[in-house]
Amino acid sequence: MAASAVFYRSKQGETIDEIVWRHYGNRIAGALEIVLEANRDLATLGPVLPINTEIELPAIEAPKEAEAVRLWD
């Protein structure tokens, strides 16, 4: 089952960086760029978003853990 996007409405004084960090954390590299791609007009609104701006937070798969390589036993 594929995950779906979440829609969020901004509150007073919020920035897109803050919203993305709270939603995805630091576990997904490039999350801000993916959100900006999904919401092309956000960048034109300035650093602090207007109150009640709707933002699509798309489902992003977290990268899989890399398998460890053991050089010696």
Image: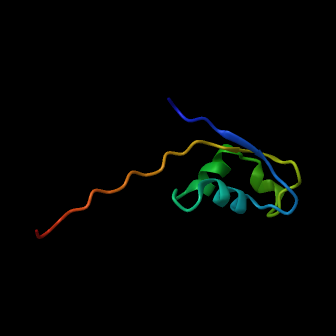
Q: Position of residue 29 (x, y in %)?
A: 51, 59
Q: Position of residue 38 (x, y in %)?
A: 66, 44
For the residue pair 61 and 47, the one nearer the viewer reads as 61
The residue located at (62%, 56%) in the rendering is: 32
Q: Position of residue 26 (x, y in %)?
A: 55, 62
Q: Residue furthest top?
A: 1
Exactly how many numbered labels are in the figure? 0
The residue located at (83%, 57%) in the rendering is: 49
Q: Quadrant of residue 25?
A: bottom right
Quarter of the figure that contains the C terminus = bottom left
The residue located at (85%, 63%) in the rendering is: 13
For the residue pair 51 and 25, the one nearer the viewer reads as 25
Q: Residue furthest bottom?
A: 72
Q: Position of residue 65 (x, y in %)?
A: 36, 55
Q: Is residue 64 left or right of residue 43?
A: left
Q: Is residue 39 left or right of residue 11?
A: left
Q: Residue furthest front?
A: 73
Colour logic: rainbow
The residue located at (52%, 32%) in the rendering is: 2
Q: Is residue 5 above or below residue 65?
A: above
Q: Is residue 31 left or right of residue 49?
A: left
